[in-house]
Amino acid sequence: MEQTALMTEMGRDWDKFHASDIARKLPFFSRENRLHDCLFSQQFDRALLDYLFAVADRLRAVTQNKTGADTVSQLLAHKRAMLYFVQPSTRTFLSFLNACHILGLKTSEIRDTSTSSEMKGESPEDTVRTFSSYVDLIIMRHPTPGFVEKTAWFMNRIKRPVPVINGGSGKDQHPTQALLDVYTLHRSLPGGPEGKTIVMVGDLKRGRTVRSLSYLMKNYRGVKLVFVSPPQLRMEADILEFLQRHAIPYRETDDFASVMPEADAIYMTRIQDEHDQAEESKSLDLSRFHFRAQDLKVIKPNAIIMHPLPRRHEIEPVVDDDDRAVFWRQERNGMWIRAALISYIFGVDGQIPAPGKT
Ligand code: CP
């Protein structure tokens, strides 16, 4: 359905739009068959994922030398981006910042509402509209579920629509983390995720990265998911229902040791106690959900160990020295795949020279 027709049908009612089925909403966030806003993992199909992986590979190869890096840094030198990260972040913020700089985008940032006019009573909606007066791209992390989507919905209704990228939204979604996770699976496992057993461990209830990664698995044949968590932190029903609907086999257990030997990828996560209502996580013994040096002897010789980071105690630091620990590479992959995504949103992906052609 055309964006304008969708808008007419749904009127100007955000609540009605927000409550609509995701399949109906997605066209609203695309333009000329190309992603305009990046908000949900469900926006990525297999063809787009494979294409973005190729663009990211090309970017990292061509920028190895100064001539290539200079060429790429001119592609978006006429554009500006706003990074509005009002929830803590190290790698998402820095990888987006550096992805912008690789492509030549100039950047500005707000990382704390106490330094913005929201402190004078300006609404968050007016604040982000203000950004749109100055920049060509908004990249956001926000603690309120749905707020990033609302920003994109709003931007698409004004005369100068500015693309919005979701850098993490409440407990809800973190689509570019899922993008870098699946890019890491693609680069680190022969044949990528297809036919692999992926074991996700930890706080699956409140971890937005595992939610977003689960959505992406519909693009790969033969994937099996194993969810390992204490009963209190099980994966939410909406994700389990999504997996059933797409015939993606999964099972749930609290016995991490028993499933380690079958894993092709182990995706560790930390406890998300910032979402605690009454310090309920404090009483949980999570030591059974940690990966230790001795576990390296149990897992497959070619399995990989992932983590979106930051970590606390989930992975012993000594594990970092094993070649199967890919989380530091995963972090770096994020910068390249985010640069690929931004180049795609602005339609300059086709201008990235092949290595050796600069
Ligand atoms: N993985 C991730 O989102 O890390 P940050 O919170 O540091 O951005």
Image (cartoon, grey):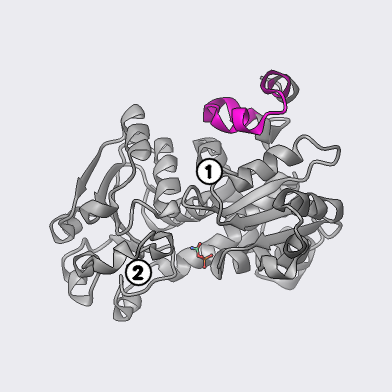
Tell me which residue sits at (35%, 76%) in the image.
320
Question: To which quarter of the image does residue 270 belong?
Answer: bottom left
Tell me which residue sits at (48%, 51%) in the image.
178
Residue furthest bottom in the image: 318
Report whether the residue tagged 1 is closer than 8 Å to ligand 1. Answer: no
Label 2, on which residue? 325
Q: Amino acid at mark 1?
A: Asp
Quick check: is 78 in the magenta stretch? no
Quick check: is 14 in the magenta stretch? yes
In the image, taking residue 293 as reference, residue 304 lies left or right, namely right
Q: Earlier in the sequence, mark 1 or mark 2?
A: 1
- Give percent across and percent down for residue 36: 70, 40
Distance from Cα at disc 1 to Cα at disc 2 = 24 Å
Label 1, on which residue? 50
Callout 1: SS: helix
| Vertical relation: 187 (above or below) 215 | below
Q: What secondary structure characterizes most of the magenta part? A: helix
Return the residue nearer the eye: 261 or 110. 110
Q: Can you say which quadrant of the picture contains the C terminus?
A: bottom right
Tell me which residue sits at (71%, 66%) in the image.
110
Per the rendered image, the range of residues in magenta is 6-27
Callout 2: SS: loop
Q: Amino acid at mark 2?
A: Ala
- Whether residue 99 is visible: no
- Whether residue 325 is visible: yes
Q: How many marks?
A: 2
